[in-house]
Amino acid sequence: MSSANGLDVRLYVVTDPALTPADRLAEMCVAAVRGGATLVQLRDKKAPDGELAAMAAGLARALAPWRVPLVVNDRLDVAAATGSGVHLGVHDATPAQARARLGHEAIVGLSVEAPEQLDPERIDPASLAACSYLAASPVCETPTKIDTLAPLGLAGVTAIRRRSTVPLVGIGGINTPQRAAEVIAAGAAGVAVVSGVFAAPDPQEAARALRAAVDDALARRRDQP
Ligand SMILES: Cc1ncc(COP(=O)(O)OP(=O)(O)O)c(N)n1
Ligand SMILES: Cc1nc(C(=O)O)sc1CCOP(=O)(O)O
Ligand SMILES: [Mg+2]
């Protein structure tokens, strides 16, 4: 089920070099996709651009038969060189810059660390309009990324959702089906997950369970009067 802009963010898996080493990257992402992941992000903060581009190209090839899009974290140049989308944070290029570089069909995501970040005086309307999705960052504390602001909690997810119309994913500490369901009930269209899938003994099964919880929670939300 896609959002109004055609992007399916229900289960967004994000790689991590400690959990998805380069020699198992494609295989592990394909396992997640077999389990129900709808979007994949290549996130490696340290790999040089050339190495990251080679990883992105290989991963894009592996995902192509599944028609699951690839997003590269941070690196606009790598995204442009490999035909991928890009995820941006407050310290990265702006969504408007990314949209201009990648074109109107590309996926451009933006981290939102506080609802006020979306106030008209805080964000350039062109940048907000350039976003394919937003990420509530982080929902819960997580050892996977420690340089974050205070967790938003479920109330923060709801507050961000109320200020935007593009699809919203929650990220950070969403490592059980129960937690995923709560994030959807709070207003997200999907969940972004690292360790809940890639540190699991069986990533395909972990993805299946998370995706089932997301789908169930979305259906419950639709049934609400
Ligand atoms: C889906 C998603 N959401 C948030 C982030 C974090 O982005 P950012 O704040 O730029 O931090 P880094 O990931 O670059 O350390 C993300 N990567 N993906
Ligand atoms: C990549 C990333 N970004 C975050 C943010 O808050 O912006 S939290 C995070 C890591 C999420 O890992 P896990 O699913 O293992 O908790
Ligand atoms: Mg970033």
Image (spheres, rainbow, N blue to C red):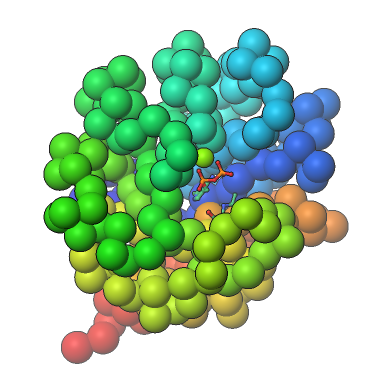
Judge from the rendering whether residue 169 lies leftward or rightward of residue 32; answer left or right.
Answer: left
Counting from the top left corner in percent of width and height, residue 138 is at 52, 63
Counting from the top left corner in percent of width and height, residue 132 is at 30, 42
Displayed quadrant of residue 41: top right
Q: Residue furthest front?
A: 121
Does the image show residue 193? yes
Displayed quadrant of residue 202: bottom right
Q: Is residue 19 placed above or below 56 in the rendered structure?
A: below
Which of the two residues, 4 or 129, is positioned nearer the viewer here? 129
Q: How many marks?
A: 0
Identified at 23% across, 70% down, the residue is: 162
* Screen quadrant of the C terminus: bottom left
Counting from the top left corner in percent of width and height, residue 206 is at 70, 61
Identified at 49% across, 43% down, the residue is: 39
Identified at 79% across, 58% down, the residue is: 200
Q: Is residue 102 placed above or below 34 in the rendered structure?
A: above
Displayed quadrant of residue 100: top left
Does the image show residue 64? no
Q: Is residue 133 placed above or below 51 in the rendered structure?
A: below
* Screen quadrant of the N terminus: bottom left
Which of the two residues, 123 or 52, is positioned nearer the viewer here? 123
Which of the two residues, 172 or 152, is positioned nearer the viewer here? 152
Which of the two residues, 20 or 209, is positioned nearer the viewer here? 20
Counting from the top left corner in percent of width and height, residue 171 is at 53, 60
Judge from the rendering whether residue 122 lies leftward or rightward of residue 70; answer left or right.
Answer: left
Identified at 29% across, 26% down, the residue is: 97
